[in-house]
Image: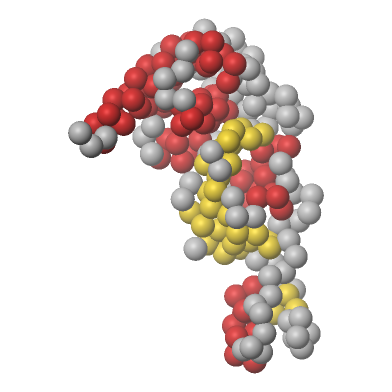
Amino acid sequence: MAVAAKPGYSCPYCATSFNTVDDLKDHVLKVHGTEALPRPEGYVKLTVNGQAWELEVAPNWTLFYLLHDQLGYTGAKTFCDRGACGSCTVIIDGRPVLSCMTLAIECDGKNIETAEGIAAAKHPLIEAYVKHHAMQCGYCTPGFVVTAKALLDRNPDPTVEEIKEALAGNLCRCGTYPQHPIAIIEAAKKVLAARSENTPA
């Protein structure tokens, strides 16, 4: 489990200061063994692409800032920074969410999936997007792919209209819109085929 922490943690029982949360926890276990382990304010646990993290976040940090600037998941992009373009979309507990409009502190206990996780899992969307040229400059592509993946997770056989509705919040300045349904339908066929192969007879 990866841990990121800032110095300056005080024991709530004896006011001794520590540089890390782990040092504070060790102290409480050794010196105050019968007391509850403290959890500093602003300290969250979350999972990103299967990697568990424990870290301190500032009250004003967005999830985008945490993922992109603190943890190095650069797949999510900042385009409008106003929740209007979809380029910063990530999946939280199965739902596509705009990370620029979500506070990091709200994500305690959440399971988050980014474009990097989707690519690492070799999801059929990646190959289909490349094959059907569903991007030009590529800046908006991670947001589209993440949104499409969330759609296929809940509806593995969507219609063109359902795809258009799901992608309605994602903007592309290059105008690649006609290619997205083509790529997603092809990926959906592969998702369905893989599910059929894994279904017991």
Residue 134: x percent and y percent? 48, 15
The residue positioned farthest toward the front in the image shown:
201
Which residue is located at x 67 percent, y 45 percent?
63
In the rendered view, how is the structure colored?
secondary structure
Q: What is the tally of numbered marks visible in this picture?
A: 0
Question: Compared to 61, does 28 lie above or below?
Answer: below
Q: In the picture provided, is 45 more to the left or to the right than 154?
A: right
The residue positioned farthest toward the top in the image shown:
178
Quarter of the image holding residue 38? bottom right
The residue positioned farthest toward the left in the image shown:
201
Q: In the picture provided, is 43 more to the left or to the right than 184?
A: right
Which residue is located at x 54 percent, y 38 percent?
94
Quarter of the image holding residue 123? top left
The foreground one among 160 and 183 is 160
Residue 20 visible, this angle: no
Residue 187: x percent and y percent? 38, 22
Which residue is located at x 57 percent, y 64 percent?
3
Please identify the quadrant where the C terminus is shown: top left
Residue 18: x percent and y percent? 69, 79
Question: Compared to 7, does 190 lie above or below?
Answer: above
Residue 166 visible, this angle: yes
Question: Compared to 116, does 149 lie above or below?
Answer: above
Question: Compared to 70, does 194 lie above or below?
Answer: above
Residue 100: x percent and y percent? 71, 37
Quarter of the image holding residue 16? bottom right
Which residue is located at x 27 percent, y 29 percent?
196
